[in-house]
Image (cartoon, grey):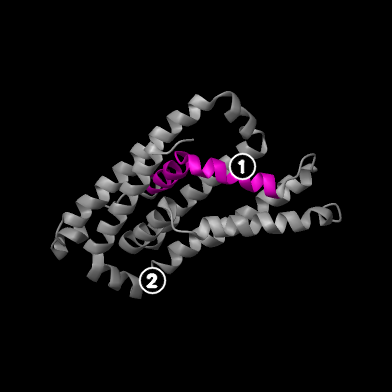
Amino acid sequence: MSSLLPYLPQLLVAWGAYLIATASPGPAVLAIIGTSISRGRSSGMALALGVLTGSYIWAMLTAAGLSALIGSYGQALVILKIAGGLYLLWLAFNALRAALRKEPPKDIAENEVAPSLHRLYLKGLGIHLTNPKAIFNWIMLVSLGMPKDAPVGVTAAFIAGCMVLGVAVFTGFALLFSLGAVNRVYRKARRGIEGAMAGFFAFAGLRLLTAKL
């Protein structure tokens, strides 16, 4: 524990930056909120766990030296950027289709087959793994929290702290927006919410496809 104390100020800054980044509205956060409202707590939690898995895959790869690999294999990042942009546009299309659909009759809604938890988990994983912004965020965070030649214990503490914060933020969104009161509000404003999500996903996808790395 004493070996971590000299690095604690940098770790606190990095953890604070991670907290702000994860709690800020983005494709992952909006997907968790929308799923929790429309599908319920377990569905929102499944998607949140997929996002968390993707986040910590990038964390481990970045800590292992991903930034150096990016410098050598920049074309792979371009491919990832295109895939991420197209995936966001696909999410936008689905959200728009839901927004244009009138509220189904009650009996149809009850018989509608919801996506499996496994499928929602993979959706969350896909949102995060195909987002180049997540890679650059982790490169920034690692540079803040893990100075050069830092011992392995500092790396473990940094990633563990981010993991705790990520679980709290993403599952917190899933729990909050699956509450009954929030669900009732969603049912009244469903088409507007889905339309707003379609617009955001489309904007994020187009911006990702046209942005320079």
Residue at numbered disc 1: 139
User: Extreme front residue here?
Assistant: 212
Where residue 43 sits, quadrant-wise, is bottom left
Q: In terms of image quadrants, where is residue 29?
A: bottom left
Task: Name the outermost residue toward the right.
Answer: 2
Which of 126 and 84 lies nearest the eye of the viewer?
Answer: 84
Q: Is residue 152 magenta?
A: no
Q: Which label sits in the foreground, 2 or 1?
A: 1
N-terminal of the pair, mark 2 or mark 1, is: 1
**In terms of depth relative to the viewer, which is nearer, 45 or 95?**
95
Circle 1 Cα neighbour tier, 10 Å, few/some/many (<14 / 14–19 / ≥20): some
Image height of 73 relative to 6, above or below: above
Residue 17 lies left or right of residue 87; in this view the side is right
Q: Name the spot of residue 78 as percent of width and height, x first.
A: 45, 30
Q: Residues within 10 Å of mark 2 (few under 14, many from 20)?
A: some
Judge by depth and name the residue closer to the eye, 196 or 159. 196
Q: Residue at x 31, y 56 (%)?
A: 197
Residue type, mark 1 in image: Ile
* Magenta-colored stretch includes residue 122: yes
**Main structural element of the magenta stretch: helix, strand or loop?**
helix
What range is drawn magenta here? 119-144
Please, is residue 58 above or below residue 172 in the view?
Answer: above
Quadrant holding the N terminus: bottom right
**Residue that badge 2 annotates:** 179
User: Relative to residue 77, is residue 71 drawn left or right?
Assistant: right
Query: Looking at the picture, how far across and down is residue 175, in whole percent?
Result: 45, 66
Secondary element type, mark 2: loop
Q: Residue 180 has which mark?
A: none
Distance from disc 2 to disc 1, alpha carbons, whole Å, reads 35 Å
What is the secondary structure assignment of the residue under circle 1? helix
Q: Amino acid at mark 2?
A: Leu
| Residue drawn at x 14%, y 60% as measured from the top left | 102
